[in-house]
Amino acid sequence: MAMSDKEVLEGLAEIVAEETGLDATEVAGPKSFTDDLDIDSLSMMTIVTLAEEKFNVRIPDEDVKDLVTVADAVAYITKAQS
Amino acid sequence: MTTLQTTKGPEFARLMGLGIARGENVVTNDDVAGPIDSSDEWIQQRTGIVTRMRAKPETSVLDLAERASRDAIAAAGIEGSEVDTVILSTITHPYMTPGGSPELGARLGCPTAAAFDISAACAGYCYGIAQADALVRAGQSRYVLVIGAEKMSDFVDPTDRSISFLLGDGAGAVVVGPSDTAAIGPTVWGSKDGAKFVGMTASWLDIRDNRDTPFPTLFQEGQTVFKWAAFELPDAATKAVEVAGLKPEDIQAFIPHQANMRIIDQMAKRIGLPESVAIGRDIADSGNTSAASIPLATERLYRDGQVKSGDLALQIGFGAGLVYAAQVVVLP
C-alpha cells in the first residue's frame, strides 16, 4: 500500500540518520543531500539502496543524480509506490 | 569394450603456504591528489586509502609474482620442481599472448608444469583457488601454484578520478595441495554483464584504427560498482558460508577484495559478521591491487596477529566483468 509523503519522509530520515549520524529532524524536504546534509556519492548510493528495500521501490542508478533534495527523493519514492 | 580411464584424486585439498610481494615504493594521497584536484582528506574519507604501494619502473608484474611464489613454495615445504600446475591471475601482464605463467614456472624451477593465465580481474585469486581445488581433488594436479599478481600502475591515468588513484601493485601466491581434511569450501561464483561499469578506456583495435587514441587505462563507474559490491555480493558471501556447512560465528576472518574500505565495511555489516571476526583492511596501506589484494590482506592479518594457521577465513573477490567468487578456506 502506498505511503503518504509524511510517512516516506519519516522513513527516509531514519535511513539518512543511520548512514550519516545526523539527527533525523535535520532531514527536511528543502535540504540538499550534498550541499546541506554533506552526503557524498557513496553514502547517497547506500541511502538509495536502503530506501529501495524499505519502500519496496526500484531507483535506477541513472535517476539518482536527479534526487537533489530530500523532497525530490520523497516525491520519487511516493510516485514509484503508486 | 574399451573403457576410458580417468584420474581420481584425494578427497580434499588445502592451502599449504602463502607468499606475497608489494610494490617497493610508498605513494601517498598527496602524491596522487594534484592531477585529480583532490586531497588526502577526500581520498581517505571516500576510500579509506592512506597510501598505496607501487613498484619501481624496472619491476615487472612477473617479478612481483616470482617473489610471492618463491615464498609460497617455501612456506608450503615443497620444492619448485614439485609444482605441476601454475595458475596466474592477472590483468596487467602487458602481452595479449603468451600468458605470463609459463615464464613464471620456468623461473620457479617447474618449467614443464601446466601453466595458464586467467582473466577474472579482482576476483581472479578466488577463481584460481576454485580451479586449483578442483584440479587437486580430481587427481589432475598434485601441487597447484595460484598467483594473483598486478602492476596496476602501468595502466593508470593520473588525471582519472574514477579508479586510478586507488590502485597499487603487488602479488600474492599460495600452493594448493592434497589434504586429509576438508579445507577449501565450495566456491560461490558468478558473473553479470557489466563491461561498461569497469574496464579499459580503449581496445587494441581502437589504437590500430586511430593512432591518436590515448594509451588504454582503467576506468570504473564507481557508484554502480559500489552498489553491486556492497549490497548484492554479501548474499554470495553468506551463501559461501552456508554451503561450507558453517555459520557466520564459525568464521575467524573476513578477507574481501580490497576495493574500497567503505565496501568492506558495508559488506561486513550486511553479512552480519560478529565483532570477533578479523577483517582484512590492507587497502589502507597497499591500495587496490586487484587479484593480489586478498592474499596481501591475508598476510597483513597474520603479521598483525589477527589470524593464525588453521583459522577459517571467508574470502570474496569481485571486479571487472562483472565477476565474483567467494569461498571459505582454512588458512595455511
Image (cartoon, coloured by chain):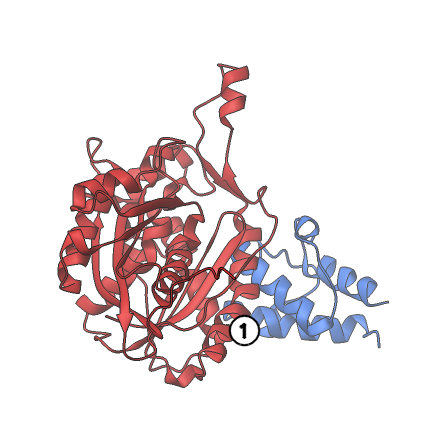
Chain colours: A blue, B red
Identify which residue is drawn at 71% across, 63% down: A29
Q: Is residue B26 left or right of residue B293?
A: left
Quadrant of res B172: bottom left
How crowded is the residue under tag 1: few (<14 C-alpha within 10 Å), some, or many (20+)? few
Quadrant of res B140: bottom left
Q: Is residue B98 left or right of residue B69?
A: right
In the image, residue B133 lies at what x, y percent?
37, 65
B152 vs B224: above or below: above
Q: Nearer the viewer, residue A69 or B113?
A: B113
In the image, residue A47 lies at what x, y percent?
60, 64
Q: Is residue B22 left or right of residue B222?
A: left
B1 vs B43: above or below: below
In the image, residue A2 lies at what x, y percent?
83, 73
Can residue A49 be seen here? The reply is yes
Residue kind at label 1, given as amino acid type: Glu
- In the picture of the structure, the residue carrying the numbered disc 1 is A18
Can residue A38 be seen here? The reply is no
In the image, residue B209 lies at what x, y percent?
55, 16
Q: Is residue B112 left or right of residue B191?
A: left
Given the image, what chain letter belongs to the residue carrying mark 1?
A
Residue with the most extreme front position: B1
Q: Nearer the viewer, residue B166 or B124?
A: B124
Identify which residue is drawn at 21% across, 75% down: B309
Identify which residue is drawn at 53% across, 15% down: B210
SS at mark 1? helix
